[in-house]
Amino acid sequence: MDNKMRLTSSEITSLWTQYIQDTMAICINKYVLATVKDPEIYSLYEFTLGIAEKHLKVLSNIFKSEKLEPPKGFTEKDVNVDAPPLFTDVFWLGYMHEMTMHGLAGYSISFSVSARKDIRDHYFNVILMLWRFIINRLKFFYPKAFINDLLIFLNLKRVNQLQS
């Protein structure tokens, strides 16, 4: 099987889904970068914004080479980066962890339903990149999230004790 094969319906579906998810990630990352205060979390979102933009270019090239119209996706019209912060920096850290895990699962499924080698290679490379991201970058942020959660828990416990 090679690139001369037409895309299967499951490949088109997974490429379409990944495209939508990457455009959403770009919007969310831009909002977070406009509101987050912690420089380490900022750098994490800056890095992942670059990844999402890179994936979008690869996906756009695939759609173009297959003479398929890409989905509209999310745009700058769908996010107000000037809006006040909705969540804490630590929330965004947890969000990054969850979205990375969901991305890993989604790309793994996309890999498993793809017949063409170039599409499988793309998904395989993204899966490897996500694992490297988890191992090399995200792991350093776990203590920060854990300590903050512990402080919140202790404060809530103290509030409950004072109210009793």
Image (cartoon, rainbow, N blue to C red):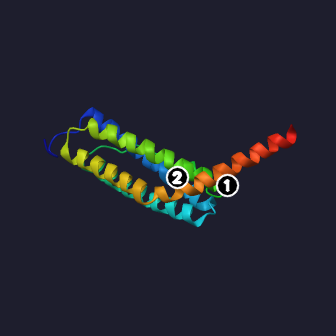
- Answer with the quarter of the image where residue 7 lies: top left
Measuring 39% from the left and 40% from the top, which residue is drawn there? 105
Label disc, if present, on residue 27 of the rendered structure: 2
Q: Compared with residue 53, is residue 39 higher up or lower down, i.e. above or below?
A: below
| First in sequence: mark 2 vs mark 1 | 2
Residue at the farthest top position = 9
Determine the residue positioned at 40% across, 56% down: 135
Read off the residue under disc 1.
83
* Separation of residues labelled 2 and 1 (CA atoms): 13 Å
Where residue 101 appears, x then y in whole percent?
44, 44
Q: What residue type is labelled 1?
A: Ala
Please give the name of the residue rendered at 42% of the width and 53% of the height, measured from the top-left corner.
134
Q: What residue type is labelled 2?
A: Cys
Number of numbered discs present? 2
Q: How crowded is mark 1: few (under 14 residues within 10 Å), some or many (20 or more)?
A: few
Q: In this view, does 120 lie to the left or right of 77?
A: left
Determine crowd level at label 2: few under 14, some 14-19, many 20+ residues with C-alpha closer than 10 A. many
Which image quadrant is residue 156 in? top right
Q: Please say whether residue 86 is visible from this viewpoint.
A: no
**Residue 103 seen in this snapshot:** yes
Q: What secondary structure is marked by label 2?
A: helix
Q: Position of residue 83 (x, y in %)?
A: 67, 54
Q: Compare residues 160 and 33 and report the one nearer the observer.
A: 160
Give the quadrant of the N terminus: top left
Check the image and report above or below for 82 versus 121. Answer: below
